[in-house]
Amino acid sequence: MMSDSIWDPLVEELASRQRADRKVELWLRDDDAVDPTPALDRLLDLTGEFAVPVTLAVIPALTDGKLVGRLDKTPHATVAIHGWAHRNHAPENQKKQELGPHRPRGVVLDDLARGLSRVTGLHGARAVPMLVPPWNRIDAGLISDLGSIGFAALSVYGPPKPASLAVVNSNVDIMDWHGTRGCRDHGLLVQAIVAQLQHAFDGGEPVGLLTHHLAHDESAWLFLERLFAVTAQAEACAWLPISTLIGRGPGKGK
Ligand SMILES: [Zn+2]
C-alpha cells in the first residue's frame, strides 16, 4: 500500500527530517461534532488505532450529555468551542459568519462566553479553552477580548497572525468544499502537507490537518488511514495534543 508513488514526497520528507535529527509536528482538528454518530465512531476508532490525538470542535448550543458519554471512552479526544450555534449572521451576499461584525460585540462575546461555559461544564478536563470560529472567521476586533472571557487560544485556518493569546491554526483542509464536496485529490493533499512542513521547518509551527467527519466520503477516510499509516510509523513525526501547542503561549505570527 505504501508503495503508492503519490505518498513518496511525504515519505522522503520524513526520512530527510530523520537524517537531520529534526521532528515533524502535526495536529488534528475535526469540526462540527454534536452527537455520537457512526461517522464520529469511525473517526475515533481510526485515530485511536494510530494513537493520533484529536481535537473536536464542538458546537455548544447543539450538543449535550450524549457526546460526553461517548467521549468518556476515548482518552485521546479533547474538545474545543466551535462558536455558539454555528448560525450565520452575515447577509446572503457575504461569506458566512457567526462571529462577524453583524451584531453588537457584547452580544457576540456573550455567545462565546456561554459556549465556553457550556462545553466546559459538560466535558470538564476534556475541554480546552480554545475558540474555533465557525467557517474559520471572526471579526479581528473581537480577538483581543477573548482572553477576558476565558479563552486561552484561537484556531482558524491559514498562516497565524500576531495575537494576545495562543493561535494554533489548521493549514491543510482535506475536503474539496467548492468542487466535489468530497475529499481533495490525495496526491495534491500530500503535496500540500509537504509544502506546509517545509514552510514550517524554520518557524517551528506545527502543521494542522482539518477534517469534518460528518462530511467525509470514502476517499477522505482512506486518505486519513494512509496518512496515519505513513506518519505514525515514522520516528521523525509526532502527532501532538492541542494542550501541548497551547502551552507554547501567544501566537507570534510570521
Ligand atoms: Zn463548522
Image: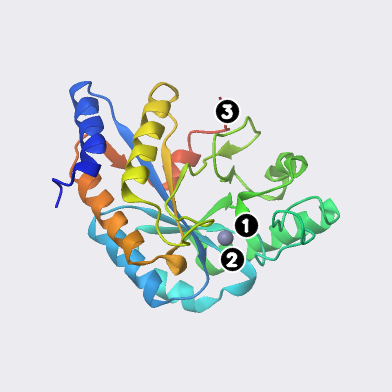
Residue, disc 3: 253
Crowding near the residue tagged with mark 2, few <14, some 14–19, many ≥20 C-alpha atoms within 10 Å: many
Q: Is mark 2 within 8 Å of ligand 1?
A: yes
- Give the mark nearer the N terminus: 3 vs 1: 1
Asked whether residue 42 is in view, the answer is: yes
Along the line of sight, the residue nearer the viewer: 243 or 4: 4
Q: Quadrant of ligand 1?
A: bottom right
Quadrant assignment, res 73 = bottom left
Q: CA distance from mark 3 to mark 2?
A: 27 Å
The secondary element bearing badge 2 is classed as loop
The secondary element bearing badge 1 is classed as helix
For the residues carrying marks 2 and 1, which lies nearer the camera in this image? 1
Query: Is residue 231 found left or right of 78 in the rendered image?
Result: left
Q: Is mark 1 within 8 Å of ligand 1?
A: yes
Location of residue 222 in the rendering, given as x and y in whole percent from the top left corner: 28, 60
Q: CA distance from mark 2 to mark 1?
A: 9 Å
Location of residue 177 in the rendering, given as x and y in whole percent from the top left corner: 52, 57
Crowding near the residue tagged with mark 1, few <14, some 14–19, many ≥20 C-alpha atoms within 10 Å: many
Quadrant assignment, res 253 = top right
Along the line of sight, the residue nearer the viewer: 24 or 119: 24
Residue, disc 2: 59
Q: CA distance from mark 3 to mark 1?
A: 21 Å
The way the protein has been coloured in the rendering is rainbow
Location of residue 187 in the rendering, given as x and y in whole percent from the top left corner: 31, 45
Q: Amino acid at mark 2?
A: Ile
Residue, disc 1: 134
Residue at x 40%, y 53% (from the top left corner): 184
Q: Amino acid at mark 1?
A: Pro
In the displayed structure, 98 sits above or below 232; it is below
